Image (cartoon, helix red, strand yellow):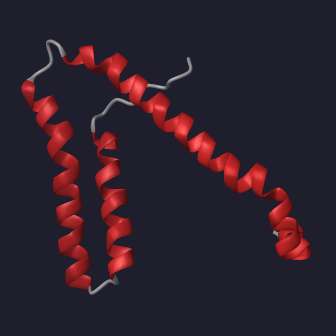
Amino acid sequence: MLVGLISSDAGQKIMAPFSIDLFKGMLAFFLLDMRLMAAKNFSGLKGKPPITLFYAVGAPLVHAAVTLGLCKLLGLALGDTILLMVLAASASYCCTGRITPRFT
């Protein structure tokens, strides 16, 4: 943070290809990899109970709706509410009881 404070706007413009622009490219590759992993592992649903698929689709929606209700009850700002809804919806994987590391 100190380097960023010292270098100010001129330093930010110089470092933009490595920090800002690179992040967008890496995010695109990450999302592509996640889609490929999901497509590759989709066949793993064969033989699983149908509740697994219903939970995978429904849980993020339910979690987001519950979070919306709680945020409205607490009177949180719209931006905070949306952020918490996204976090609650994306956290449904942690309740499955099994998290497999990708690189073993």
Residue 36, above or below 57: above
| Of the pair 12 and 54, the residue shown nearer to us | 12
| Of the pair 53 and 96, the residue shown nearer to us | 53
Looking at the picture, how far across and down is residue 31, in whole percent? Answer: 47, 37
| Of the pair 19 and 104, the residue shown nearer to us | 19
Residue at 33% of width from left, 69% of height from top? 82
Q: In which quarter of the image is the C terminus?
A: top right
User: Does residue 72 appear to the left or right of 40 in the view shown?
Assistant: left
Q: In which quarter of the image is the N terminus?
A: bottom right
Looking at the picture, how far across and down is residue 27, in whole percent? Answer: 56, 43
Residue at 35% of width from left, 26% of height from top? 38
The single residue placed furthest to the left in the displayed view is 50
Q: How many marks do you count on the picture?
A: 0
Residue at 22% of width from left, 70% of height from top? 68
Looking at the picture, how far across and down is residue 64, in whole percent? Answer: 23, 60
Indicate the quadrant where residue 2 lies.
bottom right
Indicate the quadrant where residue 70 lies.
bottom left
Residue 103, above or below 85: above
User: Does residue 64 appear to the left or right of 16 in the view shown?
Assistant: left
Residue at 30% of width from left, 33% of height from top? 97
Looking at the picture, how far across and down is residue 43, in whole percent? Answer: 25, 14
Residue 43, above or below 79: above
